[in-house]
Amino acid sequence: MKLAVAACIFLELLSCCTISSALLSFAELSYATFQSRPHITKLDVASHDVPTAYATTKIVELLSFIRHKSSDEVVANELSIILGDPERQLVNSIMTAQPDRKSWLIERPHLLIQHPILAEHILQQDARILSTEQWFTQYLKLTKADRTKIQSRLPTVGNQIMSIGRYRLKQWFVYFLSDIGLAAQELRKMITARPILLSYKLSNVQSTANFFRDEVGLSKSELKSIITSYPSVLMFSVTSRLRPHVHFLQDEIGGGKENWKAWKKVICTYPQFFSHSLDKTLLPKIQFFCDKQGILGLKKSELSQVVAKFPPTLWLSDQNLIDKFDYLTESLELSAKELRGIVVSYPQLLGLSLENNLKPKMGFFLGNDEKGAVCDDVDFDCGMTRKELKEFVIYQPALLAYSLEGRLKPRIQQMDELGVLFQYCPKNIMSYTDEKFSCFLSAQTDCWTIID
């Protein structure tokens, strides 16, 4: 620290700063004291591991006065009385440095306090001096595409990074690499996705991380997972956002601390849960699902199951949900109790697109049933009745979640080619592995004898 302060003082000399008349009288007095009793001035500096602001100011004034009265050589001789060997060595390095290097350091005296190693590097003749933005790019190994993304998300990125400073940026990076345990590639991905994070105080980010560790009980790997998947979670206030949302899961959704394992899973799987307003979104959704006069009228225990299985039900819009409830009810002729059973059993259905997912699948299964075509753009259909499909869906609602082109259509076409009717197959047949499904088909055809 003394070395850095001494070098900073010497740069003050080289910059030939002009001191006010009021300070000049004090500097003259200090200089006179120094000339008569130099050991006192040396004692003032050397007796403090970390010099006080007063001591630093006093020495700057004193040496500025010496600089105005003496040549560089005289100043160096005078300084040798007060400075120790390491300080004198750095002073000599600065005095013998190239003019452009010396000028560069004079304009940035804070570097010697915050980055003494960097300052020493700058003084070397063949050293390459990088701007903070260049250093930022090099440190994170940003590609051109990365820089373009950052620029689009933070148009003033250059100014922002310069204002943050290299010292704070490095503290930020070291914390995430060492304490959080991010890999360099993960850190680069996170900064590219949310560069605005760099403008947040590291102490605030650390408080957020500590909250997830200490109060939520996340392991290091779980914390790392939510940070890499949703870095914006670090931008939320612990007191006004994170903690109230955790209490919401415990108290409003149900289960309390006894059900905390399930809520931890919700937080780790869907950290964007914290981005939704309690008053505007989450609390009204409880009313929507549990209202006895509403469509579902769920019990609190049923709502707890729904949220644990598929948290996004809490932030899907009311109209989005109503449209799906109406479509399922009409297409499968469901009663309110049957609809409630499907939602509680497999709420993931509510996350499927009505137009791009549910309707095409319903059209594939039903085709032209007794009530007319459900969908006109399928080239092959299963030809089930609504009653048959309803039995399948009530038994295994996940049937409607399987890929139409990847699983449903290929398997039913295989059955059709072998003369096996899907309607009479086990109702969970679509959950079979490919190997088990092949064995099932073989078992059906091996029992038959075809006679011309």
Image: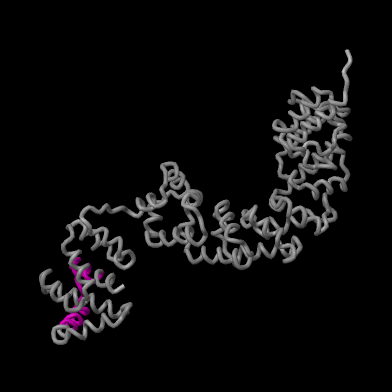
> Where are the magenta residues, as a range?
8-31
Task: Give the left or right position of residue 180, taking residue 48 as reference.
Answer: right
Residue 380: x, y in percent?
A: 77, 24
Residue 64 forms part of the magenta stretch: no
Residue 152: x, y in percent?
A: 46, 45
- Residue 165 versus residue 418 in the image, above or below: below
Which quadrant of the figure has residue 417? top right
Task: Give the left or right position of residue 134, taking residue 198 as reference.
Answer: left
Which residue is located at x 28 percent, y 80 percent? 55
- Residue 245 versus residue 400 in the image, above or below: below
- Residue 149 versus residue 420 in the image, above or below: below
Main SS, magenta residues: helix
Q: Quadrant of the N terminus?
A: bottom left
Task: Give the left or right position of residue 368, taking residue 41 as reference.
Answer: right
Task: Give the left or right position of residue 408, taking residue 275 as reference.
Answer: right
Which residue is located at x 88 percent, y 23 percent? 448
Q: Quadrant of the C terminus?
A: top right
Residue 25 forms part of the magenta stretch: yes
Which quadrant of the figure has residue 435? top right
Q: Quick one: 156 or 128, which is closer to the camera? A: 128
